[in-house]
Image (spheres, rainbow, N blue to C red):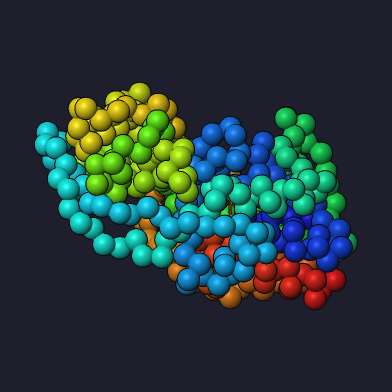
């Protein structure tokens, strides 16, 4: 039995590959939902709007392209016709201007969550939600996991383990011991733990805002919906409509540091002021605004992600891609990939690689 910790994209994609080879697999997820950083902006999981990733670049991402084909998912270009707006001053209206730079960015019909929905369908008997793994240790060549479910801790045994949490999130559970006979994995993993600790979780300190509208009024005014702002709180805004313009929506990335955005009411008020500055007093107000602050998601984001530099991820040491504990423990998650680490492409590429590595060792 292969046990996977974390039902984000990478953990689910490995589970899908192994399950298709008839390899017994269990997927343990701490959250009440699957998807990890991929989440829809409405309880209807078929919504087009995303609180996490929105874009893929299939022309340069062969692994994404092949998974989209395999799952029969279609894409459409990011809407970018018309002028952008440059938002430079808190007391002045934003000014229209051509902005290049969105070449090849596409969106997935049904949002990025459509990938999660497709994988979930095949994995419904395999995924266990509300299962927080709090410790992993080893005895007699078997893994033992402590799992907490609504306050009750139980023990779970596994022959093979795939860690699919963001690298830094995995550290505490790999360092926690059982008892004297079941030591933690800290000693066996001592060469790779510092590498995991130094690997930031891509986009973890970000907050994303989705604004729903009755119609995409900006398109009718010759605007692309794109805003570049020097004053914020949203530093970038983009058109976020469905394929034919419905449902109509914009999304923005909040540029205010995490510690200054905990007060949601004042954040919301400054978002509304920015929308007026950008689109004018006569522009329709959003019918709904949804804010997702990833900085406060402890299953994704650690303190180190909030205090360290937010560089684009680079390819980390090969040690994160080798088998540990006699080829019985592996790391996946986008940040461990040797291609496009941090991105959807990385999550899927590493999942394909881990599925091959594990099936060769069984
Ligand atoms: C706002 C935002 C915008 C982004 N934009 C883009 C984009 O446009 N294009 C792009 O390619 N990428 C983008 N990304 C990155 C993309 O979302 C990630 O690369 C991808 O989703 C990572 O998937 P993953 O499975 O590797 O990790 P995750 O999605 O982080 O999954 C990890 C899973 O592990 C679970 N877990 C954690 N701890 C435990 C535990 N102790 N026990 C059990 N389960 C646990 C978590 O709940 C989670 O479900 C964006 C990310 C964010 C947040």
Residue under the image location 83 percent in, 66 percent down: 21
Rendered location of residue 14, percent (x, y): 71, 61
Residue 202 at least partly seen: no
Residue under the image location 73 percent in, 40 percent down: 129
Rendered location of residue 317, percent (x, y): 54, 73
Seen from the viewer's position, the closer of residues 14 and 92 is 92
Quadrant of image for the C terminus: bottom right
Q: Horizontal placement of 264 versus 108: left or right?
A: left
Q: Is residue 187 above or below residue 245?
A: below
Q: How many marks on residues?
A: 0
Seen from the viewer's position, the closer of residues 359 and 124 is 124
Rendered location of residue 93, percent (x, y): 14, 37
Q: Is residue 49 above or below residue 26?
A: above
Seen from the viewer's position, the closer of residues 166 and 208 is 208
Give the quarter of the image for residue 12.
bottom right
Q: Is residue 56 above or below residue 252?
A: below
Residue 21 at least partly seen: yes
Seen from the viewer's position, the closer of residues 95 and 166 is 95
Residue under the image location 87 percent in, 63 percent down: 22
Residue under the image location 72 percent in, 30 percent down: 150
Give the quarter of the image for residue 240.
top left
Q: Is residue 153 above or below residue 200?
A: above
Q: Horizontal placement of 289 versus 224: left or right?
A: right
Quadrant of image for the N terminus: bottom right
């Amino acid at each position: 039995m292969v046990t996977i910790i974390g039902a984000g994209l990478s953990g689910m994609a490995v589970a899908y590959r192994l399950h298709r080879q008839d390899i017994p697999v269990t997927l343990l997820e701490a959250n009440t939902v699957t998807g990890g950083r991929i989440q829809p902006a409405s309880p209807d999981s078929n919504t087009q709007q995303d609180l996490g990733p929105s874009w893929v670049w299939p022309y340069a991402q062969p692994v994404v392209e092949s998974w989209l084909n395999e799952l029969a998912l279609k894409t459409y270009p990011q809407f970018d016709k018309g002028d952008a707006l440059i938002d430079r001053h808190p007391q002045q209206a934003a000014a229209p201007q051509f902005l290049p730079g969105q070449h090849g960015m596409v969106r997935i019909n049904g949002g990025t969550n459509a990938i999660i929905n497709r994988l979930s369908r095949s994995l419904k008997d395999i995924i266990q939600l509300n299962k927080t793994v709090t410790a992993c240790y080893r005895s007699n060549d078997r893994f033992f996991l402590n799992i907490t479910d609504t306050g009750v801790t139980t023990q779970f045994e596994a022959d093979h383990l795939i860690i699919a949490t963001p690298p830094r999130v995995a550290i505490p559970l790999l360092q926690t011991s059982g008892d004297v006979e079941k030591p933690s994995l800290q000693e066996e993993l001592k060469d790779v733990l510092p590498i995991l600790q130094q690997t930031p979780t891509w986009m973890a300190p970000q907050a994303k805002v989705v604004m729903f509208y009755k119609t995409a009024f900006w398109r009718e005014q010759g605007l692309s919906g794109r805003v570049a702002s020097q004053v914020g709180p949203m530093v970038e805004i983009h058109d976020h409509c469905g394929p034919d313009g419905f449902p109509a929506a914009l999304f923005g990335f909040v540029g205010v540091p995490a510690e200054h955005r905990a007060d949601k009411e004042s954040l919301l008020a400054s978002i509304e002021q920015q929308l007026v500055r950008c689109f004018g007093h006569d522009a329709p107000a959003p019918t709904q605004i949804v804010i997702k602050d990833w900085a406060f998601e402890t299953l994704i984001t650690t303190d180190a992600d909030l205090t360290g530099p937010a560089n684009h991820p680079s390819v980390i040491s090969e040690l994160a891609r080798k088998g540990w504990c006699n080829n019985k423990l592996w790391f996946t998650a986008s940040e461990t990939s040797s291609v496009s680490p941090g991105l959807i492409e990385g999550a899927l590429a590493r999942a394909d690689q881990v599925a091959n590595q594990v099936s060769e060792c069984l």
